[in-house]
């Protein structure tokens, strides 16, 4: 199972790619992904809303290091 932070990292990477891989917008992409993932996870399986994260949570809203996408197979063989 992929944890929440990994889902946010993956979504931020997707957003970055969809926007043409611009430089300097890491934080914006991370925050957008964070909001999207949280919106999708807004309710637990029991139907009750999740508790909001504490502002003192040291991991709240922290961007993860950018990872480059793997080379496409056609480029890797060149």
Image (tube, helix red, strand yellow):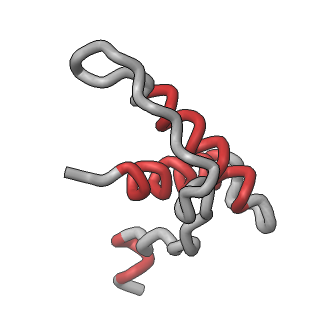
Relative depth, front residue between 2 and 55: 55
- Left or right, 24 with respect to 18, comes to right
49 left or right of 11? left
Q: Can you give x and y, in whole percent of width and height, for residue 4 in the image?
A: 38, 49
Residue occupying the far top of the picture: 47
Outermost residue, right side: 24
**Residue at the image position 68 percent from the left and 60 percent from the top:** 21
Residue at the spot x=50%, y=48% of the render?
11
Of residue 21 and residue 65, the one placed in the foreground of this image is 65
Q: Residue at x 37, y 21 (%)?
A: 43
Q: Outermost residue toward the left?
A: 1
Q: Position of residue 66 (x, y in %)?
A: 57, 72
How many tags in the picture? 0
Q: Is residue 49 above or below residue 10?
A: above
**Image: 70 above or below 37:** below
Indicate the position of residue 52 as horizontal and vertical percent values.
52, 35
Of the 4 image quadrants, the one containing the C terminus is: bottom left
Answer left or right for 34 relative to 73: right
Lateral position of residue 39 relative to residue 7, left or right = right
Q: Quadrant of residue 56?
A: bottom right
Residue 3 in picture, x, y percent from top left: 31, 53
Which of 19/54 is in front? 54
In the depicted structure, whether residue 23 falls above or below residue 31 = below
Residue located 72% across and 58% down the image: 27
Along the line of sight, the residue nearer the viewer: 19 or 50? 50
């Amino acid at each position: 199972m992929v944890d929440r932070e990994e889902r946010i990292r993956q979504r931020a990477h997707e957003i970055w790619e969809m926007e043409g891989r611009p430089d300097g917008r890491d934080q914006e992409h991370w925050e957008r992904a964070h909001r999207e993932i949280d919106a999708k996870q807004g309710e637990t399986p029991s139907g009750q809303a999740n508790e909001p994260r504490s502002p003192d949570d040291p991991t709240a809203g922290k961007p993860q290091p950018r990872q480059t996408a793997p080379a496409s197979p056609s480029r890797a063989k060149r």
